[in-house]
Amino acid sequence: MDIVARILGIYLILLLTFWFANKEKFWMLFYWGIGIVAIVIFLFILSKKQDKKRKDNLIKDIEGSSLERNIKEESLLRGGINNDQKYFNSLSGKEFELLLVRLFESMGYIVEHCGKIGDQGGDLIINKGQERILIQAKRYSGSIGNKAVQEAVAAKNYYDCNRSVLIGSSDFTSEAIELAKFNNVRLIGKKRITRINSKIS
């Protein structure tokens, strides 16, 4: 824009100079200037249209690349939760977490994300009234052990929650169940998730 302003300034000075010195050259320069300005305006408008088109195409590409994922995410609740372990094994950790988000939102909770994976443990915080509950989500194909319970306890304290809940896509080991009872961590396995979903679907 600075260059354009300088060129315009020089052009105006030339116009004034030729107005007093040579009227014939003044009008020639004047018409040339109008033509150049028209071309610049045309190129500017064309550039804006091309920028908009590139942005629109980028948005379409992003939406297109995520369409399949969105369809799968949307089907997590619409189709209900299958009690077959293969169903849970087909979900990624992110998809399992998303399923829980939608379950709790449908139950009237306000859902927060705890941050990046591996920060301070915990995946979600759900809020309703005076309740502030830490949710630790574990999408495992095998049994869930003590470490997940310990993470839930630590995250509950870190995020200043009233209590913590460990939700898994499989069953819990006997050691995890004992440790959870001692630390007042509620355990919810795949069968209970199925029952919750069947009540709200």
Image (cartoon, rainbow, N blue to C red):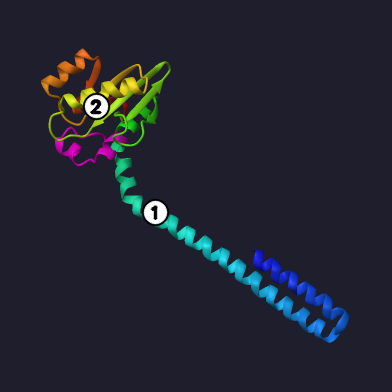
Within the image, what quadrant is residue 141 found in? top left
Q: Tell me where residue 38 appears, x and y as whole percent.
A: 68, 74
Q: Is residue 54 left or right of residue 99?
A: right
Task: Indicate the secondary structure of the residue bearing disc 2.
Answer: strand
**Residue displayed at 44% across by 55% down:** 59
Magenta stretch: includes residue 165: no
Q: Residues within 10 Å of mark 1 (few under 14, many from 20)?
A: few
Q: Amino acid at mark 1?
A: Ile
Residue 167 is tagged as 2
The quadrant the N terminus occupies is: bottom right
Q: Residues within 10 Å of mark 2 (few under 14, many from 20)?
A: many
Tally of marks = 2
Q: Find the magenta span and give its range.
A: 79-99
**Residue displayed at 65% across by 67% down:** 3
Task: Indicate the secondary structure of the residue bearing disc 1.
Answer: helix
Q: Which residue is mark 1?
A: 62
Q: Tell me where residue 163 appears, x and y as whole percent.
A: 31, 17
Q: Amino acid at mark 2?
A: Ile
| Residue 107 in sight | no
Q: Nearer the viewer, residue 6 or 99?
A: 6
Q: Is residue 77 left or right of residue 52?
A: left
Q: Residue furthest bottom?
A: 24
Give the alpha-carbon distance from disc 2 to disc 1, as whole Å: 32 Å
| Residue 7 in sight | yes
Q: Nearer the viewer, residue 198 or 108?
A: 108
Q: Tell me where residue 48 appears, x and y as whole percent.
A: 57, 63
Within the image, what quadrant is residue 132 found in? top left
Q: Tell me where residue 134 appears, x and y as whole percent.
A: 32, 23
